[in-house]
Image (cartoon, grey):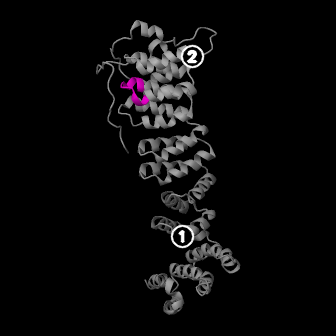
Amino acid sequence: MSGPAPSSRRDRSVLHPGLGVCLLLAGLAGSGDRALAQAPEEAAPAPAEAEAEAVPSARPAPGRVFTLEESERATLHSTLAESGTYKARIQAALLLGRRGDARHDLAALERALQEDDHYAVRGASAMAMGNLGEATAINALLEGLGDEDAFVRRACRKALGQLASPQAIPYLVLARERPEGTARMVAVELLGGLDAPDARHALAGFLGDPEPPVRDAVERALKSWPREDQVTAVLSALESDSYRVRTHAARLAGPLQDGRCLMPLAGLLSSPLETEEVIAAVDASLVEMEGLIDVDDHIKRVLGLVDREARIPSLVLLGFAGGSEAIDVLRRSAKDPDLRVRFYAVQALGRAGDTGSRVMLEAMEKDPANARIKSVIRTALRTIGS
């Protein structure tokens, strides 16, 4: 997974390594902030008296509505963006998180998280964004997980946890497109903690993640769900536009041992445009599930359905099931006037390993009518002979 990016910020404050940052100015930070802000005290220059007086008090007077006046908001925004003293910027960020609202203040906090040169200001801004409770902050906080400073990364992670809710699902889904593995992993953890069908559907989409640790986290979350939810998620993922998602969903289908997965899997195997990765995963799972195949039902489908495309998945499954009745129907289908039906019937005979079909397949190979499926006939013959 990708690590924090190097800083390109220009310092505005005098930093003193080994000394502590006080995020608890004027009693601003609550117990949650105290747990997160485990930074040592830093003897940085104190805010100018005039500047400190310009920042509204953190504690409203008794009976006062806990909101900001426009003049107060303007002062806090200006302080957060322009103050040369980092403690004043911290105070402004935390006040916006306690007394502001997302519509007016989130953008200012996002800028501070992305651009401020002091790690404590960036961390305070992340805390404030979590306190505002607005799911649209998720993207900026996910980006903040790549900050160079561990304190900021912890603050972003905590804020994301505060924002995890059904309303956050669309924003967490977008994390699939982020290049940072850490951001995608956190999105998976947050979605996995939401007891909502939409969250589970969204989480299944991360099965196609390029990094194994992220995929493993998805699979762990999926296996912790009730069985019915697991099946629903796998069925949905088998229809994904992403071949990576289909591949991993197909691998999960085998151990589930649920008959509802059979036809979707067979449908993937009979798709002429499917990738080799998906085909290999489907093949392995259908071998594992062959005991679930209802041979009688699929024989009826092959013999009774007019629609060619509806018959083909059943031909595929009969090849995995094997047995004399399935073989008989496959041999008959190998003589079907439709070339595509013959293709999948021959492929199924090869998969079933029916040596009794060798003479018929050799004759088919010589028939000019089968020139376009000669390669699958030869493959079936090699399989039968091996």
The N terminus appears in which quarter of the rendering?
top left
Q: Is residue 250 above or below residue 270?
A: above
Q: Tag 1: Cα neighbours inside 10 Å, few (<14), some, or many (≥20)?
A: many
Q: Tag 2: Cα neighbours inside 10 Å, few (<14), some, or many (≥20)?
A: few
Towards the viewer: 241 or 383: 241
Residue at label 2? 70
Specify start and end residues of the magenta stretch as a single range: 113-122
Q: Secondary structure at mark 1?
A: helix
Do the residues under discs 1 and 2 have CB atoms within 8 angstroms? no
1 vs 2, front mark: 2
Residue at the spot x=49%, y=91% of the render? 362
Q: Position of residue 205 (x, y in %)?
A: 53, 51
Q: Secondary structure at mark 2?
A: helix
Q: Position of residue 303 (x, y in %)?
A: 68, 81
Look at label 2 and name its amino acid. Glu
Towards the viewer: 140 or 228: 140
Q: CA distance from mark 1 to mark 2?
A: 63 Å
Task: Check residue 207 in the rendering and tell me which mark sits there, or answer none.
Answer: none
Look at label 1 and name its amino acid. Leu
Is residue 120 on the magenta stretch?
yes
Is residue 257 on the magenta stretch?
no
Residue at label 1? 269
Towards the viewer: 170 or 277: 170
The C terminus appears in which quarter of the rendering?
bottom left
Q: Is residue 332 above or below residue 79?
A: below
Q: Position of residue 380 (x, y in %)?
A: 48, 82
Q: Earlier in the sequence, mark 1 or mark 2?
A: 2
